[in-house]
Image (cartoon, rainbow, N blue to C red):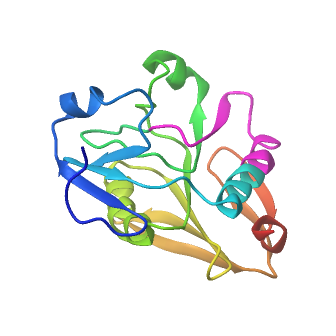
């Protein structure tokens, strides 16, 4: 079914319409970006550990009006992404149905793994275009957590926290204290 160049970590499929994408079997592990099907393998244990631990930390400080979700589809326009973690307004979730989130999350987090270029370049530009106010990237290889904010329509790093950092991070609806070494495991 998937055609095109296949790297060990990512398959880029043919151009498909949104209607064709919706006809795929239930729960494909794929994103729909610029009219292409982007298929990635299951994340590593470290990747999932980081997303889960960060989710638990954020959930402990998030207001009752917001929900922390892991690996749920976000469709801000013509594209559909699967951020590793999002903080979403519960009322917007209820209004949009359960298949995918169509509002704008307060925060999206990507844990870098196999498809680093998409998270650092392609998704970053698309997320800024969609007006996502807070974007964080956890890079297990560099052992950093970088926070971004939109400046003149593009993301600019607001801070880079290394393995030794314990930082209070603004997620828009709350502030969470993160020990980067503990988060990285």
- What residue appears at the point 50 percent right and 24 percent down from the top-left corner? 92
Instruction: Reply above or below: 155 against 161.
Output: above
Q: Does the magenta stretch include residue 64?
A: yes
- What residue appears at the point 23 percent right and 66 percent down from the top-left corner? 5
Give the image location of residue 87, x and y in percent: 61, 41
Give the image location of residue 155, x and y in percent: 42, 67
Give 35 or 10, whichever is nearer the viewer. 10
Instruction: Reply above or below: 58 against 121.
Output: above
Give 91 or 100, whichever is nearer the viewer. 100
Give the image location of residue 58, x and y in percent: 75, 47
Asked whether residue 153 is in view, the answer is no
Residue 57 is left or right of residue 124, and the answer is right
| Magenta part of the chain | 55-73
- What residue appears at the point 36 percent right and 37 percent down from the top-left corner? 75
Instruction: Reply above or below: 11 against 96.
Output: below
The answer to which image quadrant residue 142 occupies is bottom right
Q: How many labels does the image show?
A: 0
- What residue appears at the point 34 percent right and 69 percent down from the top-left corner? 7
Residue 10 is left or right of residue 98, and the answer is left
Residue 92 is left or right of residue 26, and the answer is right
Asked whether residue 5 is in view, the answer is yes
Instruction: Quadrant for the C terminus, please.
Output: bottom right
The answer to which image quadrant residue 138 occupies is bottom right
Q: Is residue 130 magenta?
A: no
Instruction: Quadrant for the N terminus, please.
Output: top left
Q: In the image as oriented, which residue stretches furthest toward the front? A: 1
Residue 146 is left or right of residue 151, and the answer is right
Give the image location of residue 99, x and y in percent: 45, 24
């Amino acid at each position: 079914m998937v055609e095109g160049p296949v790297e060990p970590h990512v398959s880029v499929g043919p151009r498909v319409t949104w209607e064709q994408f919706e006809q795929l079997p239930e729960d494909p592990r794929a994103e729909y970006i610029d009219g292409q099907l982007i298929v990635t393998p299951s994340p590593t244990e470290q990747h999932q550990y980081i997303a889960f631990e960060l989710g638990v930390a954020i959930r402990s400080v998030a207001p009752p009006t917001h929900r922390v979700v892991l690996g749920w589809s976000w469709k801000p326009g013509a594209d559909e992404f699967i951020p590793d973690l999002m903080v979403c307004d519960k009322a917007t979730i209820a209004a949009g149905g359960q298949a995918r989130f169509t509002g704008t999350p307060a925060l999206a987090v990507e844990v870098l793994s196999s498809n680093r270029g998409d998270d650092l370049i392609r998704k970053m530009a698309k997320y800024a275009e969609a007006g996502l106010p807070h974007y964080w990237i956890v890079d297990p290889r560099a052992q950093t957590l970088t926070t971004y904010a939109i400046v003149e329509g593009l993301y600019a790093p607001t801070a880079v926290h290394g393995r030794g950092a314990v930082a209070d991070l603004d997620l828009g609806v709350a502030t969470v204290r993160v020990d980067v070494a503990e988060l990285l495991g």
